[in-house]
Image (spheres, helix red, strand yellow):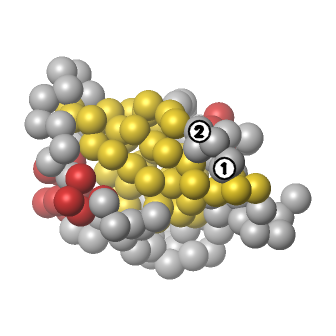
Amino acid sequence: MALAETPRVLILKATAYTSSVWETDRTPWITATGARTRLGIIAVSRDLLKGTLPYGSLVKIEDLGRWKDGSDAGRFDPLFQNILFVVEDTMNKRKRQQIDIWFPDRSLALKFGVRRVRLTVVRYGRPGAQ
């Protein structure tokens, strides 16, 4: 486990997903690591998974607004403020420099849309992982 002594901050594109077969695979409630989906689970693009945000990393997320124009910033902060998100899933290989936040229902995921987020790394990887 590597605690982030000086937290690394990333500004990334963020989308939302739910546990549906048209958004995931045949096992929509199970992540790439075998964890069960829940609020607090994020998927990361494979380029981030390879070193910046390995499985098990803990992060805080701040909503910086809509991707295109930054409008509506902070709308999701009340939902995110007390959650440490954990990297447990992987995005499609065509995605780069992006995260996908799991939501419990499709309507909330659609309201989230595509946003810019500030992601602060609290812990890199899992405790005891090399």
Residue at point 14%, 60% (across, down): 107
Q: Nearer the viewer, residue 30 or 12?
A: 12
Q: Nearer the viewer, residue 15 or 2?
A: 2
Q: Any mark on residue 4, and which?
A: 1
Amino acid type at mark 2: Arg
Q: Quadrant of the N terminus?
A: bottom right
Residue 20 visible somewhere in the drawing? no
Q: Position of residue 128 (x, y in %)?
A: 83, 69
Residue at point 13%, 29% (across, down): 71
Residue 34 visible somewhere in the drawing? yes
SS class, disc 2: loop
Are the residues flagged by discs 1 and 2 in contact, CB closer than 8 Å?
yes
Amino acid type at mark 1: Ala
Residue at point 24%, 53% (across, down): 77
SS class, disc 1: loop
Label 1 packing within 10 angstroms: few (<14), some (14-19), many (20+): few
Vertically, is 93 above or below 37?
A: above
Q: Which residue position holds label 2?
A: 8
Label 2 packing within 10 angstroms: few (<14), some (14-19), many (20+): some
User: Which residue is outermost to the right?
Assistant: 130
User: Which residue is outermost to the top?
Assistant: 69
Q: Is residue 124 left or right of residue 16?
A: right
User: Which residue is outermost to the front?
Assistant: 5
Q: Position of residue 108 (x, y in %)?
A: 17, 59
